[in-house]
Amino acid sequence: MTAKATPSSLLITPKDHTLIMIDFQSQMAFATKSIDAVQLRQHAALVSSAAAGFGVSTILTTVAEKSFSGPMFDEVVAPFPGQKLLDRTSMNTWEDEAVIAEINRIGKKRIVLAGLWTSVCIVGPALSAISQGFEVYFISDACGDVSTEAHERAVQRMIQAGARPMTSLQYMLELQRDWARGETYELTTGIAKKYGGSYGLGIIYAKTMFGAHEG
């Protein structure tokens, strides 16, 4: 067996998947207990900002926006100025014809999911997409549920069905993958400094104190 300096096909790239951001809305967040609301917003913002910056095909969808669940988080919408939000009545995004039409228009077989709640609005499309032959990833720390138990059981159920979990920071760094990619270096470190928690603080410190550069 000979090793080669090439990446696994299991790693995502900016052009090989569709990101679906689901129901990051006020009413859904009020009942979310598995993750702190501040962390949830940071993680959602990191994912949205990275996806927009890397040119990832992205669908933003809400449920009952006007009548019940309220507006989508500004942090999620702002990186995609002018993009239409696809509002649904179905809890399962995969049962909405407008969303499916957009997925088919984009035409990618790899789907990445993030949103609220894990046990309903993420499990539904994850299992549905897998059953139709799509490859599914979900960003576990950019999802939340009414309890830790609900979130964890949903994560287990998706993994058992073949979905692959990742985190918000992992998602962005997997898009970048090589610090020699200078065209997105400032984008990646800038998002990390703003939304990357202690990792972002480390970047700020290193650059301020030593003029450090990852590349």
Image (spheres, rainbow, N blue to C red):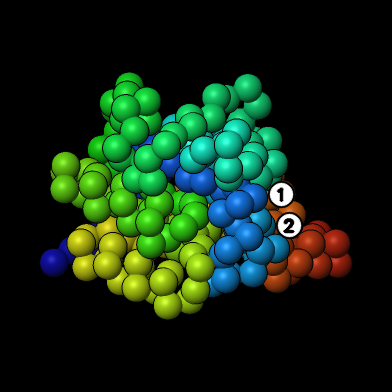
Does residue 35 lie above or below 91 as drawn? Answer: below
Is 124 left or right of 42, judged from the image as shown?
A: left
Residue 59 visible? The answer is no
User: Mark 1 belongs to which amino acid?
Assistant: Gly
Q: Secondary structure at mark 2?
A: helix
The residue that label 1 is drawn on is 190
Residue 159 occupies which quadrant of the picture? Answer: bottom left
**Can you give x and y, in whole percent of width and height, for residue 146 in the image?**
51, 68
Does residue 202 lie above or below 79 as drawn? Answer: below
**Can you give x and y, in whole percent of width and height, for residue 39 in the image?**
65, 64
- Pointers 1 and 2 in contact (CB under 8 A)? yes
Is 31 left or right of 213, judged from the image as shown?
A: left
**Residue at screen point 43% across, 41% down:** 20
**Label 2 crowd bin: few (<14), some (14–19), many (20+), radius 10 Å:** some
**Residue at screen point 65% across, 26% down:** 81
**Residue at screen point 54% across, 30% down:** 85
User: Mark 2 belongs to which amino acid?
Assistant: Lys
**Label 1 crowd bin: few (<14), some (14–19), many (20+), radius 10 Å:** some
Per the rendering, the mark at residue 193 is 2
User: Quick one: which residue is furthest to the right in this view?
Assistant: 209
**Can you give x and y, in whole percent of width and height, for residue 13 in the image?**
40, 44
Residue 154 occupies which quadrant of the picture? Answer: bottom left
- In space, the residues marked 1 and 2 are separated at their CA atoms by 5 Å
Does residue 128 lie above or below 61 as drawn? Answer: below
